[in-house]
Amino acid sequence: MCGIAGIFESGSRREIDRALLERMNASLLHRGPDAGGLHLEPGLGLAHRRLSIIDLSTGQQPLYNEDGSVVVVFNGEIYNFQELVKDLAACGHASRTRSDTEAIVHAWEQWGEDCVTRFRGMFAFALWDRNRETLFLARDRLGVKPLYYAQLPSGPWIFGSELKALLVHPKLQREIDPLSVEDYFAFGYVPEPRTIFKGVFKLSPGCTLTLRRDRPTSQPVEYWDVPFKAATVQTEEEAGNELLARLRESVKLRLVSDVPLGAFLSGGVDSSAVVAMMAGLVREPVITCSISFGDPAFNESAYAESVAERYRTQHHVEQVDPDDFSLVDRLARLYDEPFADSSAIPTYRVCELARKNVTVALSGDGGDESFGGYSRYRWHVNEERVRSLLPRRLGRPMFGLLGQLYPRAEWAPRVLRAKSTLEALSRDSLSAYFHSVSFVHDGMRRKLFSDRFRRELQGYDAIEVLKRHASRAPSDHPLSLVQYLDFKTYLVGDINTKVDRASMAHSLEVREPLMDHPLVEWASGLPPEFKLHNRQGKVLLKKALERYLPPQILYRPKMGFAVPLARWFRGPLRQPLRDALLGPVLAETGWFNASYLRRLVDDHQSGARDFSTALWTLLMFESFLRNVVVGTRAASMARAVAG
């Protein structure tokens, strides 16, 4: 795994500032501590940090073709590179290394921009073709690897694996985008293609960006999307056997490594399935890593231990301090943008543990999206069934009135929280799902934001993100639609971002077999009832795995990677929370309603309401402002003085 960065003068051939490019590269040292390299020529600078995984001796980057006219810097893995090398050799291309990086160079020479359709893996790369005067940027289909870019007001393009590489550039404007703030408080992250800063973008998954000399602007082009194309109906048994064969092949592809390799093992269905497949493919015991929590409500370590014993893995467990909230500011600096998923804390810790034993770890991420594992899918499908029973003009007002009259019961399980259900039924399908995934829901955001900030939004609402994707969705089935929305938003903006930053902070490569794009394509075409049936999610996956995993693993309630926020904010973080949210940093923005902020804090700390998710979202935004915005401005000023 690696980090890349670069500068491209599309309108000139001015010399690139080598010292600046080196600073951009140095900001990504954690992503590639083993080696670094630069390529400079008039109007172009490419930078690379390397974490050596495959071909340790000859895989250094930047990597060139035979005559040096094509050069690439690459972050990720091309799992089918050995097959590609054979195909390319048949076309007359000779390989000098054993690395997957060289396959990218020759694939570009052979197939041009279509080369990405041949790659099976996780990747973000920048390739320069001097003869065509073309810079080609690409990101993998599921957005496992990140790529940020911006065109500066003075003309040059800059890009990098993390936003921090771009923030090194003194001419990058650091103006926060109000629309991105609205998105952040709704989703808990800033969805693609926006970033928190105006004019800075993430290259969306399954997209490429082609920049040509003397062509000042360019737009991303999509080369792949999740198809949700109905497959030929199989029996459940046939589909289960094919699922296992596909999963086994995907895991096998991800076992190629010249450094120690293991797996995360949470004790959930997905990570346990990956470990079960690994155990059948390798001779040595699989190295597995888990973390445990002191609080039984959040602890899955016993389930992980049972899977480890069944497959005789070399299992490593560490207990996380139940009050492990020391990472707040570190996470803000790590993510570069506000990021409100509190499971970033245990994810950071399990990556830290894994790196003590391996350099590559396989994870179970992506299984819920493909196979219908989230409980919110079940609720959404059930609510859609009820909505269909009444005409919309009658149902929405009736459910809305009942929702207003019914008492709130946030303390109760969702099945008993009729107020929430009635309120959901009063909304249309997309609004209801948006409400279910929102960190700070519409009503709270309206109260939270100041009049001034709402004017800056000019009527924009974060639901536009879902509307944009829903308008392009290949299926209107209630389950398939929300799965598609999660592939485009939550999986990329939350799950993949969280794992990439947490793993790269420890120079650990994480591979995701359940995000193998042929497996995802196939699973998307399965009948929805193979995924969700009779209130049970992941129906086919669990049934297929019954020969590999016991019922207590497959059919227990999903726990997730949660942390005790509510207790923290009433206990050890009581005063730090008040200081942060009611202090000068948020107040000076002018974006927040101070009286409502105080009410949120007071009501939560008194025990009257549980506002822990909203408070954490605010806390991480305040930390972002202090650590990233103020920090980069101070660094820019220091460089200006030094210069």
Image (spheres, rainbow, N blue to C red):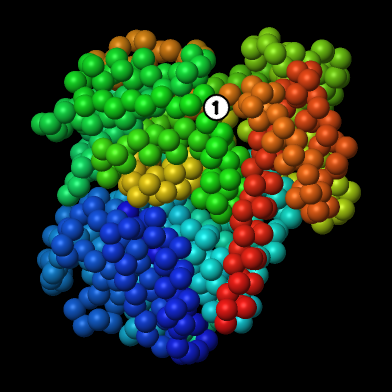
Please indicate, yes or no, whether residue 491 appears anywhere in the rendered image: no
Give coordinates of residue 183: x percent, y percent. 68, 47
Please tell me which residue is depicted at 82% across the width and 45% down the height of the picture: 592
Drawn side of residue 429 relative to residue 144, left or right? right
- Give 132 or 149, whichever is nearer the viewer: 149
What is the x, y in percent for residue 268? 39, 22
Task: Tell me residue 251's x, y (percent).
Answer: 25, 37
Dividing the picture into quadrants, the one containing residue 172 is bottom right
Q: Is residue 335 above or below residue 353?
A: below
On the image, numbered disc 1 is attached to which residue? 323
Near-viewer residue (376 or 643): 643
Q: Is residue 290 left or right of residue 598?
A: left
Q: Residue at x 47, y 18 (%)?
A: 294
Secondary structure of the residue carrying tag 1 is loop
| Residue 49 appears in the picture as rendered | yes
Q: Quadrant of residue 607?
A: top right
Residue 368 in the image: above or below residue 468? above
Look at the image and tell me in which quarter the N terminus lies.
bottom left
Camera-side residue: 389 or 70? 70
Q: How many C-alpha atoms fall within 10 Å of the one at disc 1: few (<14), some, or many (≥20)?
A: some
User: What residue appears at the point 45 percent right and 83 percent down from the top-left corner?
Assistant: 16
Quarter of the picture holding the C terminus: bottom right
Q: Where's residue 565, x and y in %?
A: 62, 27
Instruction: Tell whether 416 sits left or right of 65.
Output: right
Q: Which residue is drawn at the image coordinates 68% and 11% (left, top)?
A: 412
Amino acid beneath label 1: Asp
